Image (cartoon, rainbow, N blue to C red):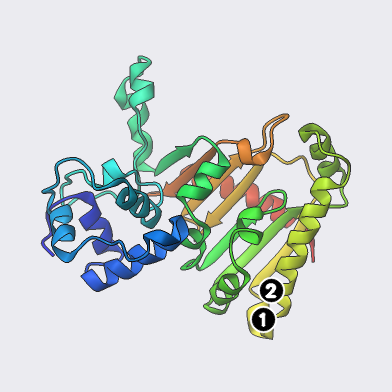
Amino acid sequence: MATSGVRLRELLRQRHWQTYRTFCREYDRAAKAVDSELIGSAPSRAQLHRWLAGEMKGLPYPHHCRVLEAMFPGWPAHQLFEQIDPTGAEPGPRLEVGDAYRDGMKQADVWPMRDAESATVFATRSEFASRVPPHVLFDDATTIDLSGLSLNLLCQSYADDRLRKTIEGGAHLRALFLDPAGDAIRRREQEEGHHRGHLSALTEVNMDALSRVRDGLSATDRNRLDIGTYDETIRFNIVIVDGQLCCVQPYMPHARGIDSPTLMMRRRNSPGTVDAFQRVFSQLWERRQSL
């Protein structure tokens, strides 16, 4: 492939997915998470060439856009098909500033954060989950840190077999649950309007599922899956992958977690916001009760 063209070309190069065969494999992997009926719907070799050369008028068909956005979390389709300077391609999705600019804020007031990191905002946690499937986050990770309430993103949306393979492949996972027997989860149940024990029961189910995965690992691999609990007022659900990608979801008053907005940040340089949430996780982890 040539070195000029759209951003999609550069992202494929960065991930070593340049060959048509490799592209189709990764396309089908993402398609399976979006809609299994889209498996096998990758563009032809000639069509892919037109995409990467920037010879498109507008964007590809919507189903292609959906799959491409799953392949490259945080990159909207229109950004994937922007022409770029091949010597200075951005490694992460950029922050959109249109709304702030229309409100009278100068672009220069917002854009500098791109020097430290890029960010994408999703209106709800469910939108985030549909746009960024768990396998995209976790499959190739080397470190995964999670803290929150029940950690459904990991325990309910990521298959046990897949998690087992990730750990056996060398990944180190630290999972921090809100203590199902603690005071903080009782307060959260009241805040969300649940009957007593509702969130505790869900959390216990997820903790048991993760413990079973750990029990099924070899002694060596088992040491790389750490589980803990904490009993403090819950403020964020935090997922940090490889110390570079951070997904944060606030717990809002009188609203279920799934209805909360989600911010996904990718580190570019240091320091940045990712570091701030890494510190939050580390402080909670230091005070944990190990299981």
Give coordinates of residue 112: x percent, y percent. 34, 34
Give coordinates of residue 37: x percent, y percent. 41, 60
Residue 19 visible at all: no
User: Residue at point 21% right, 43% down?
Assistant: 82
Residue on which disc 1 sits: 217
User: Residue at point 34% right, 43% down?
Assistant: 76
Determine whether, in the image, residue 206 is placed left or right of residue 181. left
Q: Amino acid at mark 2?
A: Val
Q: Amino acid at mark 1?
A: Leu
Give coordinates of residue 241: x percent, y percent. 51, 58
Residue 213 is labelled as: 2
Taking depth in this image into account, of 100 and 111 the one nearest to the observer is: 100
The number of numbered discs placed on residues in the rendered structure image is 2
User: CB under 8 Å between callouts 1 and 2?
Assistant: yes
Taking depth in this image into account, of 46 and 243 the one nearest to the observer is: 46
Q: Quadrant of residue 52?
A: bottom left
User: Residue at point 52% right, 78% down?
Assistant: 169
Under circle 1, the secondary element is loop
Instruction: Judge whether 103 appears above or below 285 on screen.
Output: above
Residue 87 visible at all: yes
Determine whether, in the image, residue 71 is placed left or right of residue 5. right
Under circle 2, the secondary element is helix
Q: Quadrant of residue 13?
A: bottom left
Determine whether, in the image, residue 144 is placed left or right of residue 229. left
Instruction: Judge whether 22 appears above or below 74 on screen.
Output: below
